[in-house]
Image: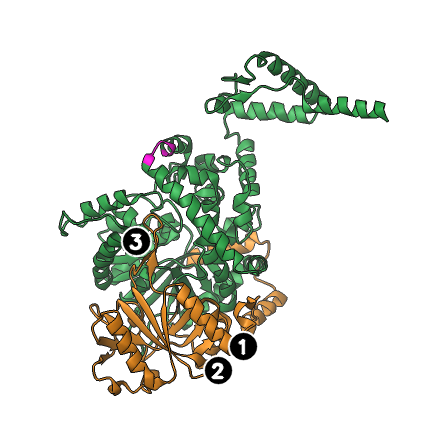
Chain colours: A orange, B green
Amino acid sequence: MSEARAQIFGDIRARLGRGRVNEGARREAEERLAAHRRNLVPARAASLDHAGQVALFVAEAQAVDATIVRVASAADVPGAIADFLTRQNLPAQLVMTPDPKLDAIPWDTRPMLELRRGRAEDGDAAGITGAFAAIAETGTLMLISGAGTPTRNNFLPDTHIVVLRASEIVACYEDGWDRLRAAGPMPRTVNFITGPSRTGDIEQRLVLGAHGPRRLHIVLIDDAGG
Amino acid sequence: MEPSSHAFKANAHRALGDANLQRAMTMMRTGFPEKRAQAIARLPEFDALRDEGIAIKNHVLAHLDFYLERFEQNVVANGGKVHWCRNAEEARQTVLGLCRALDAKTVTKGKSMIGEEIAVNDFLERNGITPVETDLGEYIVQIRHEPPSHIIAPAVHLVKEQVAESFRATHTDLPSDRVLEEPHVMTDEARGVLRQKFLAADVGITGANFLIAETGSSIIVTNEGNGDLTQLLPKAHIVLASLEKIVPTLEDATTLLRLLARSATGQEFSTYTTVSTGPRRVSDLDGPGEYHVVILDNGRSALLGGEFQDMLRCIRCAACLNHCPVYGAIGGHAYGWVYSGPMGAVLTPTLIGIEEAGNLPNASTFCGRCESVCPMRIPLPKMMRQWREREFSKRLSPATQRWGLALWAYAVQHPALYRRLSALAARVLGLFGKARGRFRSLPLAGGWTDMRDMPAPQGKSFMTLWAERQRKVGRAS
């Protein structure tokens, strides 16, 4: 296929009426790639203080059918999840990602929750994950793959419960990219998740739970001090 | 897919008489435009974002070779591979070769217009590999052996009774007396069937909404999560993309993503936006073992530097389809090939030739709604006119039409003659039409009078009335 490659690049350059990009244009493009310059960022979230961004995140996520409960500390998380499962009439067996971030939560205070740590399998009805960040602008969760965070846990279980800290909420996607670049090399998968799975493919009637989770429940820990 | 664009008129006629299609299109015409308008009203910066999106795409097109090379370097650096394909045949062979190397029996697919363009499903099937579409709409049209009729809502031409019928015919291991009336019940049934396909597949194929030069990543957006299960569970993830999908940075993709969902479905953001970079890492607990990006040219590089270059800005949101009165009346299948609506009317002739697709750029009243809603402000009516001009100069349009246009062109270039002729026509038609005030039929105007009456003119042309009025005003002053 190297012949195809050579012809495609040859055709592109011929149509653009030049050879390879000249030194000046190349330097400019290199700089553009390195600078990660932001384009216009809507004021909706960027103009708010952090408490406002948290409130916006909550409102936007709820608008796309996620459910949210706010708790004061990590100690309240197991109880909040147990309550949610009871209210939804769901069993208390859960698969949880082996994410070190979730270790700080005192799970043994609720022995009724049966937690299995690891990768989700088909048949896991509900799962718990953390999040890398969350985007206030559209109520979007940002999750990444890694040693403790398998991607399938975000998709296979019918019920996806996300434990999120208020300090993980940022204004916009661009803030999320900055955090991601600071955290290390690009992970295999970055998932932006905005509400539970849905489809409108039959007569444009909205149905939740097409292939991914039918329910997306966010337990938000107010750790940001405001 | 064998094109039937040359038969557009017959296709359209059939579509107008199809009761199910007309019911489905009525739902389509109201739903999408309303949701888009609401989403845009919520984002005051929408128009400014359009301008930035256009600038990004124009910059990329001017430096396309540079960004594609950088993309390839970064894919390789992350352990993936890029395959360059000049045409559909090369792309099909590439996909088949990758599947065979993995001894693949079944392949799951996320919705991909490039997949449609290269007709990869039929090809895999002929070679003993079973492709399974996993987007609900795409799955429905696959089991009905139909092509998609819309670039983001493949089954928009169907009503739920037709879907139920197809599910009964296909899912024969389920009880035949089950109730299939509500969309949520059918969605659930498909979920159950397709979950098993996801788990069994050897290879997953998705499209790409964007390719990122900076990181060597591909991005797809879905609402169902099917694209994620498709790429995540099998041994390999193959991405099908055309070469204009490239953008420089994650920030640039972000700007375009802010436009995409709002223009497409009126959502603030699609439910799942997924950035995929290379195969699974050593320490990862899941993910595909291989990552391949098939980059297709198929005539696109030939659009650079020419009058159709702006078409390469298209982000496939389908706003132009959703707002087009012609698409809304006849649906996507009448267009006779993969792409439909205004974007299809411009793109299809570049890909399969104006000889086959000449009807498509003619199927427009130039009302301009497509351009006004296009997030990339692609001048679709202007480009349809350019196709008509090419068709005319290649002598592809019917002789009567060319003669008529030639006469008309001569007349309008000679204003005195034009005024005299139009005054004469107005007088003659006015005389003959005086009794009824309208015509049921007129020679050479059957296309008009077949569907409605032609009102009779009052007897004087506008120019004559204007001249009289000017004279009167002159006398009065």
User: Does the CB distance between marks 2 and 1 fall below 8 Å?
Assistant: yes
Which residue position is annotated with label 1? A49
- The span from disc 3 to disc 1 (Cα, nearest Å) is 41 Å
From the viewer's perspective, is residue A167 above or below residue B254?
below
Which of B368/B66 is in front? Answer: B368
Q: Residues within 10 Å of mark 3 (few under 14, many from 20)?
A: many
Image point (62%, 24%), residue name: B408
Q: Percent from the top left, x then y, of residue B359?
A: 46, 34
Question: Of label 2 and label 1, which has the lower sequence position?
Answer: 1
Of all chains, the one bearing label 1 is A
The picture quadrant where one finds residue A28 is bottom right
Occupied quadrant, residue B73: bottom left
Which residues fall within the magenta stretch?
B15-19
| x 31%, y 80%: residue | A148
Q: Chain of mark 2?
A: A
Distance in Å between CA atoms under marks 2 and 1:
10 Å
Q: Chain of mark 3?
A: B
Q: Are marks 3 and 1 in contact (CB under 8 Å)?
A: no
- Which residue position is annotated with label 2? A226
How many other residues sit within 10 Å of disc 1, few (<14), some (14-19) or many (≥20)?
A: few
Quadrant holding the N terminus of chain A: bottom left
SS assignment at label 2: loop
Q: CA distance from mark 3 to mark 2?
A: 43 Å
User: Pointers 3 and 2 in contact (CB under 8 A)?
Assistant: no
Of the residues shown, which amino acid type is indicated by label 1?
A: Asp
Where residue A205 sits in the image (x, y, percent)? 34, 51
Confirm whether circles 3 and 1 share one chain: no
Instruction: Identify residue type, mark 2.
Output: Gly
- The secondary structure type at the circle numbered 1 is loop
Residue A148 lies, with reference to residue A209, above or below; the image says: below
Q: Which residue is mark 3?
A: B136
* Quarter of the figure with residue B274: bottom left
